C-alpha cells in the first residue's frame, strides 16, 4: 500500500512533532511518501526526509500554497492521489480544513481524528467528545484520514529519504489570504508540550491569568484554557483545550479553576498525570484527577509557583 | 441574497452519553435531542445578516429522521423563513455520513441557488468536522471554515478564522460555504410568540430518493466502545503534599 502524507508546514517551517507522529500512524498502512507544500518549503522537505520510515519526500513550492488555503492544497492532493491508497495528515486546523475537501473531490468519505490504526481499512476514532470510541471500516477504494497526533509517539529521525519536486496543480482562484494574527511566544507548543497548565473561568480575569502563566513558566509548560476562559477574554482562542479546541496528552496537566465539563475533558483526559485545583470539592474535574487539591486558586497557585 | 443553513439534530450537549452494552453504538432511545450548538450559531448569524439588510431569505435544511422537524421548527422560531426536511433514515440510531449529506445539500442548492451557505464547524455527536468542506468541494465554491467573524463585502466575504496558531483572515469569493465556530455570536432564544408563529411557517418534506442520492454508508461501524477508564486518584491536603507527590510519586516535575 502507498501512503501520501501531507506534512504540517507553516511559513516554510516543518512542524516536526505533528508530522513525525503522523508518520508513526501512516507507517502502519504502507510506504510513506511525505508531501511538503508551501511558498517556500525546500528546507521543510529536507527536514522531513530525516524522519525514519519515510520512503520519499515530495516538495511543491508555489505562492499558491503559501497560506495553506483549502482550495489549492486540496486540488494538489486530489491531483497526486492516483498513485496512493491512503491520503493522510495530522488533524491540525489546516488538515481539518483541507482533507474533507480532498475526500469529496475523490468521492470518498473522510475519516477524521483517527486515534488508532487497526489495519489498512479499519480505524478507531473518538466520538461524542471522547465518550465513546468507534471502530470504522472503510469500503472506499481510497482512504482519506486525519490523525489525532496526541495518541501516537513521534517517529525517530536519522533517516535520509530522497527528495523530489512535483509539478503544481491549477489555481482554483476562489479565495485569498489577507493576514495572520499570531501571537509570538517562547513557551512550548500546546499540543506537544510535556507539561500544560490551564486556567478556567475560576481565574476571574485576564490580569489574574498571569498567575497561571507564572506557574507555567516555572514548570517550562505550555498554557491552556477552558472555553469559558477564552469566551470571557481571559485567554486567546488558540489556548482552548477541548472538544472544539486542541487535544493534548502531556505527562502532566494542571487544571486550575476548571469545573471539568465533558467538552473540556475531551481535550485532556488522555494526559498521563492530571492535577486539579478547585475550591469546589464536588467539581467533576476531580473524577479524572490523579491528584486533587480543594483550595482557593489565589492561595494555591502562588504557593505552588514558589515551591516547584 | 438567500442564505441556506443546514441544521443537525444531535444528542443535547448536556447529556452524558452511554455506550450500549453490545457495542453496537450509543444509546439514543429517550434521550434529549437538540439542535447541534454550532448550527444555532449559524442560524443566528443568518438572522443577523438578514436584520442588517444583507440577506432576504433564510432556508434551513435538515437531513435524517422525521423527528428532525423539531430541530427545523426551532430554527424557524429563531427567525428562519422556510424549512426543508429530507427524510433519509427511519431509526434514530441511523445517521447519514457527511459525504451523503453534502450530496443532498448540493441537490437542494442546485434548486434553491442561495448566495451563501452557513453551517456548523462540527456536529457534536460524530465530531467529523467535514460536511461544509465536502459540500464546498462538490459545488466548486470557495470555503471558509471555523469562522469567528464574517463581513460581506460585495461579492466577497471577509472571514476571520480560528486556527491552531491564532487567527487567520481570508477573503473568499461568493457564493461560499462558511462553517462557524463558537465565538462568532451568542444565539438567541426563541420567544413563545415566535415558537407559535413558527408552526405556520412552511416546512417541505422530501426523501433522499427525491434527489436521487444514495445515502448508504461508506464506513461500516465495526463497534463502539467505552473509552479506557482512568484509575481513581487521591485528594491531597496541601500544596506541599501536592508538590511532594508530583516530584516523588509521579516523577513529572
Ligand atoms: C458545542 C460546545 C463545545 C464546547 N467546547 C469546549 C471546549 O473545547 N473546551 C472547553 O473547555 N469547553 C468547551 N465547551 C464549554 C463547556 O461545556 C464548559 O462550559 C466550559 O468548559 C466551562 O469552563 P470552566 O470549567 O472554566 O468554567 P466553569 O464551569 O464555570 O467552572 C469554573 C470552576 O472554577 C472554580 N473556581 C471558581 N473560583 C475559584 C477559586 N477562586 N479557586 C478555585 N476554584 C475556583 C469553580 O468551582 C468551578 O468549578 C463547549 C460547549 C459546547 C456547547
Ligand atoms: C447515532 C449515530 C449512528 C450512526 N450510525 C451510523 C451507521 O449506521 N453507519 C454509518 O456509516 N455511520 C453512522 N454514523 C456516523 C455518521 O454517518 C457520520 O459519520 C456522522 O454523523 C457525520 O459527522 P457529523 O455529523 O459529525 O458531521 P460534521 O461534518 O461534523 O457536521 C458539520 C455541519 O454539517 C451540517 N450537517 C451535518 N449533518 C447534517 C444533517 N444530517 N442535516 C443537516 N445538516 C447537517 C451541520 O451544519 C453541521 O454543523 C452514526 C452516527 C450517529 C450519531
Image (tube, rainbow, N blue to C red):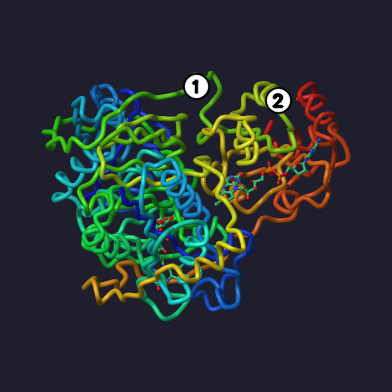
Residue shown at the point (34%, 60%) measured from the top left: B98
Q: Position of residue A223 (x, y in %)?
A: 61, 30
Residue A69 shows up from this direction:
yes
Q: Which chain letter goes with mark 2?
A: A
Residue B221 shows up from this direction:
no
Q: Are marks 1 and 2 in contact (CB under 8 Å)?
A: no
Question: Which badge, 1 or 2, comes first in the chain's sequence?
Answer: 1
**Residue A105 located left or right of residue A247:** left
Q: Which residue is mark 1?
A: A183
Q: Position of residue B126 (x, y in %)?
A: 46, 60
Does residue B167 sit above or below B7 in this rendering? Answer: above
Name the residue nearer the viewer: B163 or A196.
Answer: B163
The image quadrant in which ligand 2 is located: bottom left
* Quarter of the image where one finds residue B241: top right
Q: Residue furthest bottom?
A: B90
Residue shown at the point (43%, 77%) measured from the top left: B66
Q: Position of residue B18 (x, y in %)?
A: 60, 69
Name the residue nearer the viewer: A126 or A64.
Answer: A64
Total numbered labels placed on residues in the image = 2
Q: Which chain letter goes with mark 1?
A: A
Name the residue nearer the viewer: A131 or B110.
Answer: B110
Does residue B245 sit above or below B6 in this rendering? Answer: above
**Residue B154 located left or right of residue A96:** left
Residue shown at the point (37%, 37%) measured from the top left: A19
Q: Position of residue A20 (x, y in %)?
A: 38, 37
Name the residue nearer the viewer: A88 or B34.
Answer: B34
Q: Which residue is mark 2?
A: A215
Quarter of the image that includes the C terminus of chain A: top right
Residue shown at the point (51%, 74%) measured from the top left: B23
Amino acid at each position: 500500500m502507498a501512503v501520501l502524507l501531507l506534512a504540517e508546514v507553516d511559513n516554510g517551517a516543518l512542524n516536526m512533532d505533528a508530522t513525525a507522529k503522523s508518520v508513526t500512524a501512516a507507517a502502519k498502512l504502507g510506504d510513506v511518501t511525505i508531501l511538503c507544500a508551501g511558498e517556500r518549503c525546500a528546507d521543510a522537505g529536507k527536514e522531513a526526509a530525516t524522519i525514519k520510515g519515510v520512503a520519499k519526500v515530495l516538495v511543491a513550492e508555489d505562492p499558491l500554497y503559501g497560506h495553506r488555503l483549502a482550495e489549492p492544497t486540496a486540488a494538489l492532493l486530489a491531483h497526486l492521489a492516483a498513485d496512493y491508497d491512503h491520503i493522510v495528515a495530522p488533524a491540525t486546523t489546516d488538515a481539518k480544513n483541507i482533507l474533507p475537501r480532498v475526500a469529496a473531490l475523490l468521492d470518498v468519505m473522510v475519516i477524521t481524528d483517527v486515534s488508532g490504526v487497526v489495519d489498512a481499512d479499519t480505524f478507531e476514532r473518538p466520538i461524542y467528545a471522547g465518550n465513546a470510541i468507534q471502530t470504522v471500516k472503510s469500503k472506499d477504494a481510497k482512504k482519506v484520514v486525519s490523525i489525532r497526533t496526541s495518541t501516537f509517539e513521534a517517529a525517530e529521525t536519522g533517516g535520509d529519504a530522497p527528495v523530489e519536486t512535483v509539478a503544481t496543480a491549477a489555481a482554483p482562484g476562489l479565495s485569498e489570504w489577507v493576514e495572520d494574527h499570531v501571537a509570538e511566544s517562547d513557551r512550548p507548543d500546546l499540543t506537544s508540550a510535556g507539561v500544560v497548565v490551564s486556567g478556567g473561568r475560576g481565574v476571574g480575569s485576564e490580569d489574574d491569568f498571569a498567575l497561571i502563566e507564572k506557574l507555567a513558566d516555572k514548570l517550562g509548560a505550555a498554557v491552556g484554557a477552558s472555553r469559558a476562559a477564552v469566551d470571557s477574554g481571559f485567554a486567546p482562542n488558540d489556548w482552548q483545550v477541548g472538544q472544539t479546541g486542541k487535544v493534548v496528552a502531556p505527562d502532566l496537566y494542571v487544571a486550575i479553576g476548571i469545573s471539568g465539563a465533558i467538552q473540556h475533558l475531551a481535550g485532556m483526559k488522555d494526559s498521563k498525570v492530571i492535577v486539579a485545583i478547585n475550591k469546589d470539592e464536588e467539581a467533576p474535574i476531580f473524577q479524572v484527577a490523579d491528584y486533587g487539591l480543594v483550595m482557593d486558586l489565589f492561595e494555591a497557585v502562588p504557593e505552588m509557583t514558589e515551591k516547584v | 441574497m438567500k442564505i441556506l443553513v443546514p441544521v443537525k439534530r444531535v444528542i443535547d450537549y448536556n447529556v452524558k452519553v452511554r455506550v450500549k452494552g453490545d457495542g453496537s453504538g450509543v444509546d439514543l432511545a429517550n434521550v434529549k435531542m437538540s439542535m447541534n450548538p454550532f448550527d444555532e450559531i449559524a442560524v443566528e448569524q443568518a438572522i443577523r445578516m438578514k436584520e442588517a439588510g444583507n440577506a432576504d431569505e433564510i432556508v434551513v435544511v435538515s437531513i435524517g429522521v422525521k423527528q428532525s422537524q423539531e430541530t427545523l421548527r426551532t430554527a424557524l422560531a429563531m427567525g428562519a423563513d422556510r424549512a426543508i426536511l429530507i427524510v433519509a433514515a427511519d431509526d434514530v440510531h441511523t445517521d447519514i455520513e457527511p459525504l451523503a449529506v453534502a450530496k443532498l445539500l448540493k441537490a437542494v442548492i442546485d434548486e434553491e441557488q442561495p448566495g451563501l451557505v452557513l453551517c456548523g464547524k462540527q456536529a457534536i455527536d460524530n465530531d467529523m468536522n467535514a460536511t461544509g468542506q465536502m459540500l464546498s468541494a462538490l459545488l466548486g465554491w470557495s470555503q471558509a471554515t471555523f469562522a469567528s467573524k464574517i463581513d460581506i463585502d460585495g461579492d466577497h466575504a471577509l472571514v476571520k478564522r480560528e486556527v491552531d496558531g491564532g487567527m487567520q483572515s481570508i477573503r473568499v469569493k461568493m457564493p461560499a460555504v462558511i462553517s462557524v465556530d463558537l465565538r462568532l455570536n451568542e444565539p438567541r432564544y426563541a420567544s413563545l410568540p415566535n415558537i407559535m408563529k413558527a408552526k405556520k411557517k412552511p416546512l417541505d418534506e422530501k426523501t433522499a430518493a427525491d434527489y436521487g442520492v444514495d445515502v448508504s454508508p461508506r464506513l461500516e461501524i465495526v463497534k463502539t466502545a467505552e473509552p479506557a477508564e482512568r484509575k481513581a486518584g487521591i485528594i491531597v491536603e496541601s500544596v506541599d503534599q501536592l508538590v511532594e507527590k508530583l516530584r516523588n510519586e509521579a516523577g513529572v516535575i
